[in-house]
Image: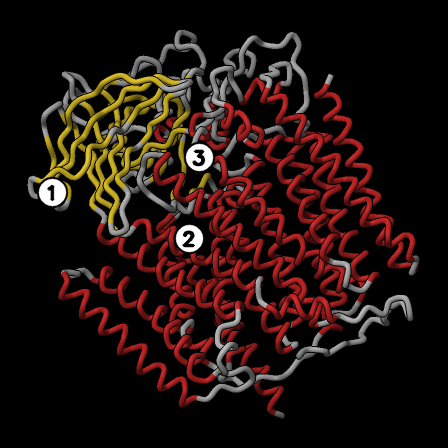
Amino acid sequence: MNPVRKRRLIVTLVIVAAVGIATAISVFALQQTMTYLYSPSEVIAGKAPADGVFRLGGIVAEGSVHKVSGTLQTDFVLTDRFENIPVKYTGILPDLFRVGQSTITTGRMQNGTFIATKVLAKHDATYMPPQVAQAIAKAKEEHRIPSGKLPPPQAGEGSTKHPAVIRP
Amino acid sequence: MTPELGQLALILALILSALQCVLPLTGAWKNSRPLMATGRSLAAGQFVFVALAFGILAWAFWINDFSVAYVAQNSNLTLPWYYRLAAVWGAHEGSLLLWMLILNLWTVALVALGGKLPEAFFARVIGVLGFVSFGFLLYMVTTSNPFVRILPAPPNGADLNPVLQDPGLTFHPPLLYMGYVGFSVAFAFAIASLLGGELKATWVRWARPWTNVAWGFLTVGIVAGSAWAYYELGWGGWWFWDPVENASFMPWLIGAALIHAQAITDKRGGLRAWTLLLSIFGFAFSLLGTFLVRSGLLTSVHAFAFAPTRGLFILVYLGVVIGGSLLLYALRAPKVTGGQPFALASRETLMVVGNLMLTVACAMVLLGTLYPLVGEALNIGRISVGPPYFGPLFLLLMTPLVLAMPFGPLSRWGKADLKVWARALVKIVALAVAAGIIGFVVGARSFYQLLGITASVWVMAGVALFAIKRWREAPAGKRYPFEMVGMMLAHFGVGVFIAGAILTRSMSVEQDVSMRPGSSVEVGAYAFQFRGVSETKGPNWLAEQGSVSITRDGKPVVVLHPQKRTYAGGQVQTEAAIQAGIFRDLYVSLGDRIGDGAWSLRVYDKPFVRWIWAGGILMMLGSFTVVLDRRFRLKRAVEPETTHAKPEPAPPGKLADDHA
């Protein structure tokens, strides 16, 4: 084998090996670290991991936000208009966190309450994350609700249309 | 009436861009000089009309013309004039117009400075830019017209999104777009070379300053965005691996690789095909970045409400540009190889390693960014990929790059002397270890603190050794040409950035606390005392303003005033208060009222956080400095202009090796 070919072979092998290893590590890391998003209906149906970290997306239910006086703890309810999950969060909430706003929280379930470590609200008040919108649409489908009967909830809509049932 | 003129100007620009694409390319193909020459005037004409449209939109904001829907959505009577102007690019339609304006600026600059390039080649370059411009203008005119009216006009506008009402974000999009669009020049050069079947090393040399300037702008654009996220989002972080941040980071990584690949092709003639490929990918990722942010496909702070027709157009356009380029590359690239061979131990090899790491990092970021979309499409579930994925992998991939970095400039082209490497290694290790020991004595104890110090000094030591080497070996007056000064600045910037990133991560103290007026909290060596909240007023907002006095060992340091603003449109926005310093930032942001006069507050001690952005700014300065090098001026003037003698439809496969 002449030197140029040999050098090319070595370089090619190194590149292939590097890319292969990088891909393997990347895919492994992806599978280790990615978190899934579930709607309250899916959580109630037992689809979410019982004791793992996942994301819960929904709308902050009307009249459910309760700040525990003197502490950083906030209790609220996330709903997809079919099921509700009580959420407990300790920390400072984002500016756009408010009733009727779609929100994604990260955390885990504990005795029927979702203990959130992160709360994400969007910076565009009229915007609903496609994931939440889909989760809500999917929940609707599963409950076989005719689409005319219950319009898909809009972020920021009035608070009296769909009074949410708050679990104790 | 004027907004309709803006609309008309856009349509005229669209027609001109179509001509700018078709005529010069046909001219280059048919070898017709008059057709080739049209490119210049068409580009100039298009610039005039796009600038006119931009001016008209800016004017509509200036006079508060709320009959224009875009103005009504993004402005307000109480919005100060500077934010009214910035609001021009505050949302989807206007930011596309800005993108177009910048593309036209680059094209016009190219026309003004490109007179010395061979005519056919230059005509192809202008034609390719015309195609890019046509796609964007068509997209604007058909799906994203900024001049749509609402009648009757509302008495007042809805206001600019308050998170955008900030100097950092006023400059962030234009700077970022300067970078994105700037990569179109290298892209057009690559496509023109492939179309012509010929690539001269001098053309790559001519493209280099443009790539450097583009990358410099992209760097500072990302820095502006990062700094903005730091103080405006109120979380005190500077990088979140948010999909939209990734969208700007991917072209940055490719751009960094491209700068080095172009240098090799320019100086040694080698790696031509690789340089072409990177040129294509640099711009492809810029397009992807622009559209990912604007498409609404991603869940992030930048995502906005979204119309499906836009998404389809974007997909088709991206498919045509990227697919077409890669097809052309596959057909033609094998014909443009060449250059001088290099040994396994050489400067080229080190630069290739760096290139490889940067591109693999880009691929890794791409995988993580698009995986949720793929997952959703394949119905695997709604997935999110976050910092636990990106952080460790990026660190892993950058380690070989950082380790190799000091040795690149110290090695010779073609074949490096292993003894030089060994001697440099000893010195660099000694300096890094010494810095680590000094750090330990001063008080650095954690692994990450020591890692930050040694890694940063490792890179900086390489720069210092290179400066000494040039001082000793090069003749006086030729020791530090601008190209090398730029390289040293940028590499030093990497060292500064590493120190900032790792030390901030390991030394920050962050606390969310609930405080009553009078109570205080210890954060690091500082005591933060909350004094209470009063009301204050700005041009278009009311705010509750906290007062927090900070002391160290009983001595007063500063009084900070974080605010919780309520804007005219009812949006609430937290304004953090920051005492900035070279060695640390003290950071307070106001949370919510939590009853009994108590408030929730977020207090941070952030050492070395400014170094992160200082490193970025050094990289930008470095890449700008390179442009001043005589290498680029001289060769441009000397380039032989022989098109009139024998115009060149060079047979594909002809190869010109004319590197210095």
Residue drawn at 23 percent across, 60 percent down: B449
Q: Nearer the viewer, residue B218 or B92?
A: B218
Q: To which residue does mark 3 refer?
A: B167
Q: To which residue does mark 2 refer?
A: A30
Image quarter for residue B213?
Answer: bottom right
Query: B364 above or below B659?
Result: above
Residue drawn at 62 percent across, 51 percent down: B182
Q: Nearer the viewer, mark 1 or mark 2?
A: 1
- Circle 3 chain: B
Q: Nearer the viewer, mark 2 or mark 3?
A: 3
Q: Position of residue B536 (x, y in %)?
A: 30, 18
Q: Disc 2 residue type?
A: Leu
Image quarter for residue B446?
Answer: bottom left
Give the Cα separation between the discs numbered 1 and 3: 31 Å
Q: Is residue B349 visible?
A: no
Q: To which residue does mark 1 refer?
A: B552
